[in-house]
Image (cartoon, helix red, strand yellow):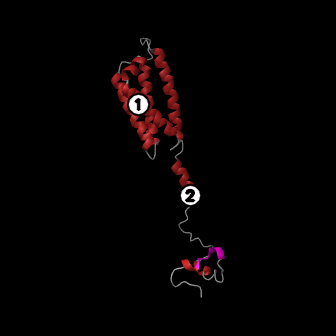
Amino acid sequence: MSALTRGLGWFSLALGAVELAAPDRVAGALGLGSRRLVRGYGLREIATGAGLLAAADPRPFVWARLGGDALDLGTLATGLGPRNPRRAAALVATLAVLGVAAVDLAAARQPRRRRARRRLLRDYARRSGMPRPANDMRGAAAGFDVPKDFRIPPALRPWGQHPA
């Protein structure tokens, strides 16, 4: 998981907690009438945030965030009318959601790291570790003298393996 998607996950959890805990204040600050809708959006944010932080592949949750951004923009558009006394706050919130949507889109367009890593791995299943076939290697170590510092002391040798 990239730092960007991890940050979006924590941002979603925090925003969802605010929307869930104080929907009246959020809706009132923006001049929106639906506190129930704000609470539902808070649940959506918490679900996508948890998905971003817990999923092996967070991309579906990033796309879910983008869908949520579209819902948020549609809801905020209703608060941009001339009858809303909090129209300036709704405009600021709309611009903030557009900025977050741009970050969500950047996260959605990131290449999957797993797929990129798989291309870098090489398949060593058919390799034996020997430079030549096994029959050619038989006896290649004949006459090899083990260095003294690699030898097992006689006291530690298993039974029956004493030097002749």
**Which residue: 42% across, 24% down?**
74
Q: In this view, does 109 lie to the left or right of 44?
A: right
Which range is magenta? 147-153
> Up-down: is 43 above or below 52?
above
Q: Which numbered disc, 2 or 1, marks the residue closer to the eye?
A: 1
- State the residue lying farthest toward the front: 155
* Residue located at (38% from left, 33% from top): 44
Asked if residue 49 lies in the magenta stretch, the reply is no
Q: Tag 2's secondary structure? A: loop
Q: Type of residue at label 2?
A: Leu
| Residue 138, quarter of the rendered image | bottom right
Observer-nearest residue: 97 or 6? 6
Q: Position of residue 11 (x, y in %)?
A: 47, 33
Three-letter code, disc 1: Gly
Q: Residue at image x 59%, y 85%?
A: 163
Separation (CA) of disc 2 from disc 1 = 40 Å
Image coordinates of residue 104 in percent, x first then y, are 50, 34
Q: Residue 22, how many percent across, how many down?
A: 38, 24
Within 10 angstroms of label 2, few (less than 14), some, or many (20 or more) residues?
Answer: few
Report the disc number at residue 27: none
Q: Which residue is drawn at 44% across and 31% down?
A: 14
Q: Is residue 76 above or below residue 82?
A: below
Task: Give above or below for 123 relative to 69.
Answer: below
Please give the residue where the numbered disc 1 appears in the rendered image: 16
Depth order, front residue of 23/151 = 151
* Residue 125 position within the rendered picture, expressed as x and y whole percent measured from the top left: 53, 66
> Quadrant of the rendered structure where residue 128 is?
bottom right
Residue at the disc numbered 2: 121
Q: Quadrant of residue 73?
A: top left
Q: Residues within 10 Å of mark 1 (few under 14, many from 20)?
A: many
Going from N to C along the chain, the mark reached first, 2 or 1, is 1
